[in-house]
Every structure is written in structure tokens, then in C-alpha cells.
Image (tube, grey):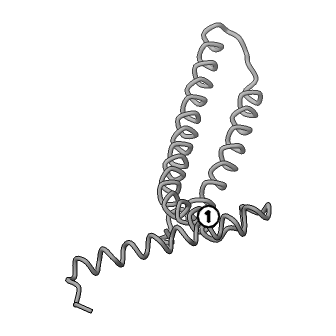
Amino acid sequence: MSAMDPQSQLEKAATDLNYVLHFLRTEYAQKFEASGEPNLNPMKLMQRLERIQEDLPRLKEDCLTLCTEKRNLIEMSKKTLLDTRQRLLDMNKNLGLDMPDDHLDSIYQDFNEMAAVCNDQISEMIPCFSSSNS
């Protein structure tokens, strides 16, 4: 038997690996999919895990972006609410109307409570997404 050159050995190894891969795919398909349990196929499970691992960093980044945008939206809404409240008070004053401050204060207080809940939820989520466990 003559010694094969490295290129031929690599080509033969690739061919052998492709044959084994095809054989395993066929065997797993027959064994797991024919039994009515396609989700138990170890090769498919590994492929799904690999896709999830590939998607996870992007999803973490997207979630952090959403959390940041949500905080920005809350702050902008708070500023708008305060500006609107002040304008209402000024308009009522100019018109000589007496609008009870407690009504506007209760609206502002309700908003602050909802904003605090949102901010707490975001603060709880951010450490999960900013950890280096990619």
C-alpha cells in the first residue's frame, strides 16, 4: 500500500465524515421521527441549541436597547405631563378659573407610581442582560 499525500488523506477523511454524518442523520430520522418523537432527535436538539446560542447575544442587546428606550420614554412622558400640568394651571389662572390642584396632583402621582413600577422592573432585568454570561 503506497503512502497517500496529505491532500488525498484530507479528502478521504472529509468523504468519510460526510458518509458518517449522512448515516447518522438517516439513523436518527428513522429512529426518532418514525417513532413519532421528532423532538427527541439529539442532532436536531443540538442544532436548536446552537441557533439559540447564536441568537442570545443579539436578543440581550435588543432587550437592553428596549429597556433604555422605555426609560427614555418614561422620562419624556413625565416632562410632558409636568409641562401640560403647568400650562393648565396657567390657563386656568388667566381665565380666572379655579381648578383644584389635588386633581392634577393625583394624576401626576398615579403616573409617578406607574413609572416607578416600570423602572423597578427594568432595573431588575438589566443585570440579567448586562452580565457577561453570553
> Label 1 crowding class (10 Å Cα cut-off): few <14, some 14-19, many 20+?
some
Figure quadrant of the N terminus: bottom left
Give above or below for 101 relative to 6: above
Amino acid tagged 1: Lys
110 and 61: which one is in front?
61
**Residue 28 appears at what percent x and percent y?**
65, 69
Name above or below for residue 46 compared with residue 71.
below
Tell me where residue 96 appears, x and y as whole percent.
67, 9
Instruction: Report the residue that reaches farthest toward the front.
Output: 1
Question: In the current view of this chain or complex, which residue is farthest to the top?
Answer: 95
Residue found at x 51% / y 43%: 69
Q: Is residue 51 left or right of residue 15?
A: right
Residue sitting at x 53%, y 60%: 51
Furthest residue to the left?
Answer: 5
Q: Residue 73: where, in percent of width, then height?
A: 54, 38
Q: Nearer the viewer, residue 83 or 29?
A: 29
Q: Quadrant of residue 2?
A: bottom left
Describe residue 88's horizontal placement relative to residue 106 as left or right.
Answer: left
Q: Secondary structure at mark 1?
A: helix
Residue most extreme to the bottom: 1
Residue at 43% from the left image edge and 75% from the top image edge? 17
Front residue of 106 and 89: 106
Q: Does 8 appear above or below 57?
A: below
Horizontally, is 96 left or right of 60 in the view? Answer: right
Tally of marks: 1
Q: Position of residue 110 (x, y in %)?
A: 74, 38
Q: Residue at x 53, y 65 (%)?
A: 50
Q: Which residue is mark 1?
A: 44
